[in-house]
Image: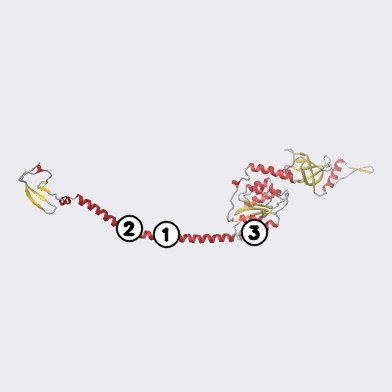
Amino acid sequence: MKVEATLHGDRKVYSVSAFNRGIGSWLARLPTIWVEGEVTELRRQEGWQSVFLTLKDVEDGSCVPVSMPRTTFDALRLEIADGDKVHVYGRPELYEARGVFQLRALSLEPLGLGAALARIERLKRTLVAEGLFAAERKRRLPLLPRRIGLLTGNDAAAKRDFVTAVTARFPAARLLVAETLVQGVKAPGAIVATLNALAREPEIDVVVVARGGGSFEDLLPFSDERVARAVASCPVPVVSAVGHEQDTPLCDLAADVRASTPTAAARVVVPDERQLRADLDRLRTALARDTRRILERGRQTLAADRQRLTRAPSLLLERKRTHLDGLAGRLRALSPRATLERGYAIVRTDDGIVRSARAVAPGSRVDVELAEGAFGARVEETRE
């Protein structure tokens, strides 16, 4: 809207509204800039649409009011308090209704290693208490993943190192590379969205989160709470290969496996094909040797069984014969014939064998059977 003045004689006079509009339009032409200062008078209320604070220059006490849309401020998930040093990215503007100059913030980043470390340590304690980093939650990686998801930034080195190492170790590996923001205030949200999308891709069995080395500030997105929780809740195992070996962002603790570098991640994700083939050859040789040993043992067992089966009928007949001989001996011992052979005789009448002298009377005829032959006799007398 064009700003117009009212003529009063030889002077142009602007209304307060027009003046503020004019100043506001000029300020709107200024570019967005970063401003550093100390947070004071931080004000946020549940029902407010904006968050307000004052940015103070610690050198001379100069101040500038700052406002930021509440949704933007909350999305950053920052634990900002009075006294913290920050970098504010925004645009100068004039709140026309009250003629107040302020900085309209578009983004905000904490400044200072100590504050960031303290914030990360507080978050780490919270996640440890929840069991998010517990060893029993870690999943084993598949031996031969059908498809490997790689989440990385535009940093060509990390992607190149991982892909080169995987291809060298296992040329048949299938990779799906997803590039996203890995640095800056928007990186955590981008990492979470990309991780979730990768995990939903068909046949993805493992996801590798890789980023090359950088400063502590560069790696801050990988210690963001959203990223740590997304890694822990990912439906497939996650390998974290962020920074250098000495770096340990929170996503390393939440991941199923931590690798010191993208190249190291390749070594844990896929086997070495040459070593795998050598192991298979060794196992094949051992299997063939064991098979031959089992066959030979079985052949020897069959031969022994054949010999036993061949001897079994003769042994059985011999046992039966011995048994029958024993029975025959017992029968011979119990036979009356054996008794007769010892000098005894069997005396019979027409009524049967004589067992008592009362069974015959003098003058009775009897038959006497001996061991050899028999004869007839007549009883002369009986004695009891």
Q: Which amino acid type is marked by label 1?
A: Gly
Could you say where residue 153 lies in the image, as x and y percent from the top left?
70, 54
Which numbered disc flags the more N-terminal residue, 2 or 3?
A: 3
Q: Which amino acid type is marked by label 2?
A: Ala
Marks 1/3: CA–CA distance: 48 Å
Looking at this view, name the residue that lies furthest to the right. 10
In the figure, is residue 23 to the left or right of 130?
right
Picture disc at residue 298: 1
Which numbered disc flags the more N-terminal residue, 1 or 3?
A: 3
Q: Is residue 282 above or below residue 93?
A: below
Mark 2: secondary structure: helix
Could you say where residue 228 lies in the image, as x and y percent from the top left?
66, 47
Circle 3 Cα neighbour tier, 10 Å, few/some/many (<14 / 14–19 / ≥20) = some
* Residue located beneath label 3 in the image: 165
Picture disc at residue 312: 2
Which numbered disc flags the more N-terminal residue, 2 or 1?
A: 1
Marks 2/3: CA–CA distance: 68 Å
Q: Is residue 64 above or below residue 170?
A: above
Which mark's residue is nearer the viewer, 2 or 3? 2
Mark 1: secondary structure: helix
Type of colouring: secondary structure
- The answer to which of 218 and 17 lies nearer the viewer is 218
Could you say where residue 35 lies in the image, as x and y percent from the top left?
80, 46
Mark 3: secondary structure: helix
Circle 1 Cα neighbour tier, 10 Å, few/some/many (<14 / 14–19 / ≥20) = few
